[in-house]
Amino acid sequence: MEGVTVSGEIAPAVAALEDLTPRRAPDEAARPAALAARVREGVARVSGALADGSLHHHPPREIPAGCRSHAIDVVRAWAAGAGPGAQRRLCGVCSPRSSSLR
């Protein structure tokens, strides 16, 4: 194909070497420490929310036999910013669900 030229506009782009080099994963020793710090922070936040009443909660002795509290749904709602009223509507003790999973 004599006489054919390639325009600079359609020529393949040249990538920088750092764009092609895979990034290293975080140091293996640092990952467990970072995870442990995140877990401690989460536990502290939940404990604080239980103490100040912003997280709806029933102690195990208050949950009727055969009833589920749906605590995970309540905690997820709290984490998303829902107030105590919205949390109670998700609570299996305060708002029992008609389900075989009770």
Image (cartoon, grey):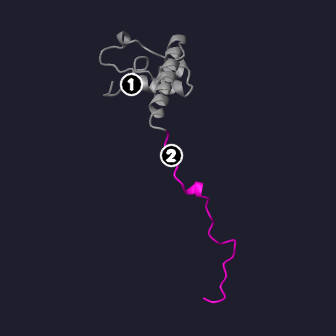
Instruction: Label 2: state its secondary structure.
Output: loop
User: Any mark on residue 44, and which?
Assistant: none
* Label 1 neighbour load within 10 Å: few <14, some 14-19, many 20+: some
3 in the magenta segment: yes
| Residue tagged 1 | 97
Q: Is residue 46 left or right of residue 102?
A: right
**Residue 99: x percent and y percent?**
34, 28
Identify the residue at horizontal 69%, vertical 73% (top origin): 8
**Residue 94: x percent and y percent?**
43, 17
Q: Nearer the viewer, residue 48 or 95?
A: 48
Identify the residue at horizontal 56%, vertical 21% (top origin): 83
**Residue 25: x percent and y percent?**
49, 43
Identify the residue at horizontal 66%, vertical 72% (top origin): 10
Question: What amino acid type is highlighted by mark number 1?
Answer: Arg
29 in the magenta segment: no
Quadrant of the drawing holding the N terminus: bottom right
Which numbered mark, 2 or 1, is in the foreground of this view?
2
Magenta span: chief secondary structure: loop
**Residue 59: x percent and y percent?**
40, 12
Q: What stretch is highlighted in magenta?
A: 1-26
- Tag 2 and tag 1, C-beta contact below 8 Å: no
| Residue tagged 2 | 24
Using the rendered view, name the quadrant where residue 91 is placed: top left
Quadrant of the drawing holding the C terminus: top left
Instruction: Label 1: state its secondary structure.
Output: loop
